[in-house]
Each structure stands twice: as C-alpha cells, then as structure tokens.
Image (cartoon, grey):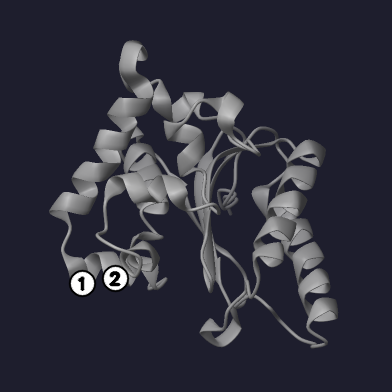
Amino acid sequence: MPQRKPIFFQNGYYHVYNRGHNKQPIFLHYKDYARYLQRLKEYLEKHPITLLCYCLMPNHLHLILRQDSEEPIDVFIHRLHTAYTMFFNKKYERVGSVFQSRFKAKCIETDEYLLHGSRYVHINPIELLRAQGPALNSQLSKYPWSSYQEYTQPSSSLPISLCDTSIILNYFKKENQQQSYKQFVGNMIKNVSDDHLSDISSGKL
C-alpha cells in the first residue's frame, strides 16, 4: 500500500492561520501582541523556518511560512502556540485552550497564490482602521501588528523586522519594489467589496 504524501515538505510554502477558541480574543492588550511577536522571533531562531509575512488580529492570526528542512512546520507552530498559551493563561488567570483546535495550513503551490496570500494577510486590519477614518492603503502602514511595514518602509526605520521580504518583493521591479507592492495591495482594497473586506477582518476563514 503506497504511503500517503506528508502534509508538510521541505521548501514548501504555507499559509498558516488560527483563531481564538470559540472565536474569543487571543490578544487583549498591546503587550499580548508584543509577547507573541517576541516568541515568534525566538522560535524562528530555533527552527529552520522562514517567515514571509504575518498579521495578528484581536481574535485570529495569519502567518506565511517556508519550511526550510525536513522538520515539519507543525513542530514550530506547536511550540510557539504552547508558549503563548501558557503566557496568556497565567496572565489572565485562566485554564484551557486559547486557540481553536489545531491550526490550519494551506500549501501555497503557485507564484500567484503566494502573492495573493501575502496581500490577503496584509489587508486584514482594514476594518479596524476604518473606525479611525477612510480605509486607505496608507493606513495599513500604521497597524503595528503586521509585517506590512516591513514591505513598504525602509528597514532602518522599523522597530522590529522578522520577515524575509525579498521572496515576495522580488516579483516586482527592483527599482521600485516597495511602492509597487503598496500599489498591489491597494488594488485589492479598491476592487474587493466592503462585505468581503469585513469578512476578512473578522476572521471568517
């Protein structure tokens, strides 16, 4: 009987996402977001994983990752989310799951999917930003809990840099990669319905 193909494989790209248990918030304070990013950085240094982009939302999160060895991505995610769950439960004096079941992962098999996936991840905060004014592409740069700033601002101006942005930015002309990517994201905001943008922001995966 032939063996089933592994879910995760070396050099594979994956869109990983998860939400809070019973759709509850997984980040209640800015220090919670900061702790998750701190742990993310720590475990990226310990595991052969490349982070391409991320977005943390109040009740869900997205990561786009590349598995750089035979060690499956679920080892990395399990350690990361176990550490965050222990922190969250201790801080808020609670027990039980923080995340809803096992994380979900979609294999990214085409360049188009990789580009669209990064754009999808980065527009997640748009509804939160609309509460502060028009949902403009430029406002995404003000959201502190995604990698969009890494894609659109000079690295020297960023407080933290976790991603290898070159993999996606190299699809754009070298002389104007950051501006081209910003326009690429902006086109999705313009062309997708308000209801769809709202679904994305609310984590209806």
Looking at the image, residue 110 sits to the left or right of residue 193; the answer is: right
Whether 40 is drawn above or below 26: the answer is above
Residue at coordinates 77% horizontally, 40% vertically from top-left? 47
Residue at the farthest top position: 175
Mark 1 and mark 2: Cα distance apart in space: 5 Å
Residue 194 coordinates in the image, percent (x, y): 19, 67
**Which label was assigned to residue 198?**
2
Give, as a three-letter code, the residue at label 2.
Ser
Q: Nearer the viewer, residue 77 or 149?
A: 149
Q: Residues within 10 Å of mark 2 (few under 14, many from 20)?
A: some
The residue beneath circle 1 is: 195
Q: Is residue 62 above or below residue 171?
A: below
Q: Are marks 1 and 2 in contact (CB under 8 Å)?
A: yes
Residue depicted at x 78% and y 37%: 45
Q: Residues within 10 Å of mark 1 (few under 14, many from 20)?
A: few
Of all residues, the one furthest to the front in this rendering is: 133
Q: What percent of the width, then of the height, locates residue 203?
A: 42, 71
Q: Quadrant of the C terminus?
A: bottom left
Q: Position of residue 151 (x, y in %)?
A: 45, 33
At x 70%, y 66%, the residue is: 32
